[in-house]
Image: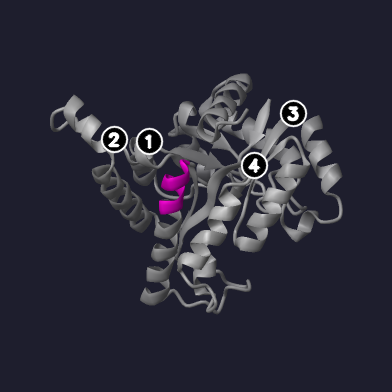
């Protein structure tokens, strides 16, 4: 069994043939699919799809790109709208959320300037959703591009402050004496760094923090990702397609879909010099554990 832990079946690209896409995924051995939201509307669609298809689950969240939306107010009304979605059946995570400082040329975001004000609002939006994840005891699906150091700092500071206010911090402090009383951020705020593209030192730090790391179809394009994949312990690795984007070889150039997940698993096995069966077994167990899938 394979699990696609990040697939946007709630996007327009799948509006006309969703039944067929889900069927092909099952035929390819992909028996569970997690659908993240990127704003309120797509989060609602993710919930609706999850409640329609037995193999699908939803995540609810607002992507950092939407921090630029002038009508996005970080207030109690937004919290309430997110809460109503997060408490729906088959919602298994908060996401996708995070920080994104990348300049996207030749896209609808090409005129978005990465100003200090924009970065600050992204952080505020992220922290609002991290709070909801803690309240609702849900893992997070983290999006990060060209902002890894900032996000590591933001997540670490949030987790430390949250632990200080909770019984978790007191329990660990009583059990261990310094320097062994480090509370891993993932103990407070479990989750996955989706489509990881940072450096090897950043990867090692994220793993030390206790997080899972997701890899997508872009690892099939060249050997550029081989070192990152090889450096990721299999008990920390998740498989994801990010459909309809990042279509793996041999289908690159076409719309991506969850049925192509085996090609990503095969590439992980190659870079890890590990049997494919072990990659499938461990990554599936990781997903079942993190998202508490039945």
Which numbered mark, 3 or 2, is in the foreground of this view?
2
Name above or below for residue 4 compared with residue 176.
below
* The one of 235 and 156 positioned closer to us in this rendering: 156
Q: Is residue 250 visible?
A: no
Provide the residue designation for mark 2.
Answer: 168
Which numbered mark, 3 or 4, is in the foreground of this view?
4
Count of numbered marks: 4
Label located before the other in sequence (3 or 4): 3
How many residues crowd around disc 3 within 10 Å: few (fewer than 14), some, or many (20 or more)? some
Q: Quadrant of residue 148?
A: bottom left
Question: Residue at coordinates 29% horizontally, 35% vertically from top-left?
Answer: 168
Distance (Cα) linking label 3 and label 2: 39 Å
Provide the residue designation for mark 1.
Answer: 210
Q: Which quadrant is home to the N terminus?
A: top right
Residue 141 vs residue 7: left or right?
left
Label located before the other in sequence (4 or 1): 4
Distance (Cα) linking label 4 and label 1: 27 Å
**SS class of the residue under badge 2?**
helix
* The one of 217 and 9 positioned closer to us in this rendering: 9
**Residue 29, numbered circle:** 3
**Residue 89, numbered circle:** 4
């Amino acid at each position: 069994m394979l699990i696609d832990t990040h697939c946007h079946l709630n996007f327009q690209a799948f509006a006309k043939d969703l039944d067929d896409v889900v069927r092909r995924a099952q035929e390819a051995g992909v028996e569970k699919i997690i659908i993240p939201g990127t704003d309120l509307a797509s989060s609602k669609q993710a919930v609706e799809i999850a409640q329609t298809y037995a193999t699908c689950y939803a995540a609810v969240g607002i992507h950092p790109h939407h921090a630029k939306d002038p009508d996005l107010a970080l207030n109690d009304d937004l919290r309430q709208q997110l809460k109503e979605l997060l408490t729906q059946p088959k919602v298994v995570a908060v996401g996708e959320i995070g920080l994104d400082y990348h300049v996207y040329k030749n896209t609808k975001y090409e005129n978005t300037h990465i100003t200090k004000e924009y970065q600050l609002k992204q952080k505020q939006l992220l922290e609002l959703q991290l709070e909801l994840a803690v309240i609702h005891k849900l893992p997070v699906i983290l999006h990060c591009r060209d902002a890894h150091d900032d996000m590591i700092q933001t997540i670490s500071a949030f987790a430390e402050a949250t632990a200080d206010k909770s019984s978790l911090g007191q329990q660990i402090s009583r059990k261990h004496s310094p320097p062994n009383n480090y509370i891993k951020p993932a103990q407070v705020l479990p989750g996955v760094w989706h489509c990881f593209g940072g450096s090897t030192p950043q990867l090692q730090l994220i793993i030390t923090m206790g997080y899972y790391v997701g890899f997508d179809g872009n690892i099939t394009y060249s050997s550029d990702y081989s070192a990152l994949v090889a450096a990721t312990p299999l008990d920390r690795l998740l498989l994801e397609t990010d459909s309809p984007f990042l279509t793996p070889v041999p289908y690159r150039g076409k719309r991506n879909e969850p049925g192509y997940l085996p090609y990503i698993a095969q590439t992980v096995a190659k870079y890890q010099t590990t049997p494919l069966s072990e990659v499938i077994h461990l990554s599936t167990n990781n997903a079942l554990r993190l998202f508490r899938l039945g």
